[in-house]
Image (cartoon, rainbow, N blue to C red):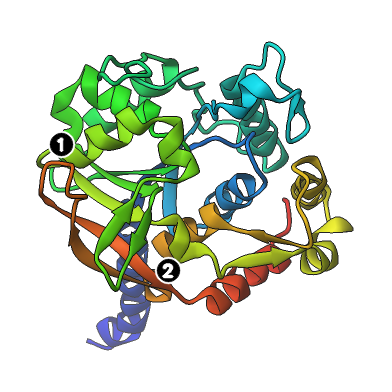
Amino acid sequence: MNDVITQYPKMKIKLTVIFSLLFMFHVSAQKKQVWVDSDSGNEMDDLYAITCLLLDTTVDLVGVSSAHFNNPDLLTKKDWNSYPTKKINTVKISQQLNEKLLKLTHKEYIPHPIGAKQMIGCAWGGQEPVPSPASAMIIEKAQKIKPGEKLDVIVIGASSNISSALLADSTIKSKIHIYLLGAQFDVAKNVWNKNEFNVRNDLNSFDYLLNLDGLELTIMPANITYDLQLTRKIAKENLENRNELFQFLYSRSNLVGAKETWVMWDLALIEAYLHPNLASQQTVKTPQENKQRNISAYTSIDHQKMEEVFLSRILSFKIK
């Protein structure tokens, strides 16, 4: 009897450790699987947004794909940001930057396939997909999702890759939830406006996603993000003299010709996704010209808290 009493505390400790490990495993197993699709070469905020996902430990980032940023200015101007427009391959630029970012964070093991080089369909419309390694791997990842779970696909550029995946394999529709930065939304009037860069770069794709019954779609309208701005002063103080990763991020402000402040559109969506308490959502109808169905839209963000969270994450990060 005394032996049992003596051993009991040890047994209790062992059981506590076992249950703790099981709980930790359960929490880890419940991590959301996330795929981010980005026109990283276009501006500076894409890379900041992807970095936040790479540094976050609450989600499982299972893929980073590159998107094109084709737009009419590439046909009429000699340069787009820092890139000569002659024979420009925008998706290749995005791909190269994604690869560099993964290397700097020592996460090259994360799949990072190149995406479509152009929009789906044609200039006058249509829904012909543009197959790519990105769309193929999105399908592969979605098909492996367990019943009751979803692959969260965060699109912070033209949505050509995810639409191409859905057009190639419609069965993944129920296995994904798309979070997309695009368009503008007047909350007071409940009115949409598609006059926005990401949408303009593939209007066919945006309309396809809006019209797709049964697709879970959450949109961060560009105008909702306007108050989240990064100043050169703050970026310089927190990034310029840190490690190679943050110096790389800081250098983007010069390459894209950023002024004293830059709207962090893409970062707003990522922070809203990672910290739901920093943004408000509501169920809204799709635009009147589209098939009428319910989708979700962000209607406000706490831009000050988002900036604090972002800077706190940056300051606490050390490359192992």
Q: Which residue lies at the image location 49% right of the left edge and 63% below the top edge?
A: 225
Q: Secondary structure at mark 2?
A: loop
Kindly identify which numbered label has been placed on residue 212: 1
- Nearer to us in this view, 223 or 143: 223
Determine contact: label 2, label 1, CB under 8 Å.
no
Residue 226, position in %: x, y? 54, 65
- What residue is disc 2 on? 275
Callout in the foreground (2, 1): 1
Q: Is residue 170 left or right of residue 303?
A: left
Q: Residues within 10 Å of mark 1 (few under 14, many from 20)?
A: some
Q: Tag 1: residue type?
A: Leu
- Nearer to us in this view, 319 or 269: 269
Q: Tag 2: residue type?
A: His
Give above or below for 1 relative to 269.
Answer: below
Residue 232, position in %: x, y? 80, 62
Q: Secondary structure at mark 1?
A: loop
- Rendered image quadrant of residue 129: top left
- Nearer to us in this view, 288 or 154: 288
Q: Which residue lies at the image location 73% right of the left edge and 36% below the top edge?
A: 81
Give above or below for 31 relative to 153.
Answer: below
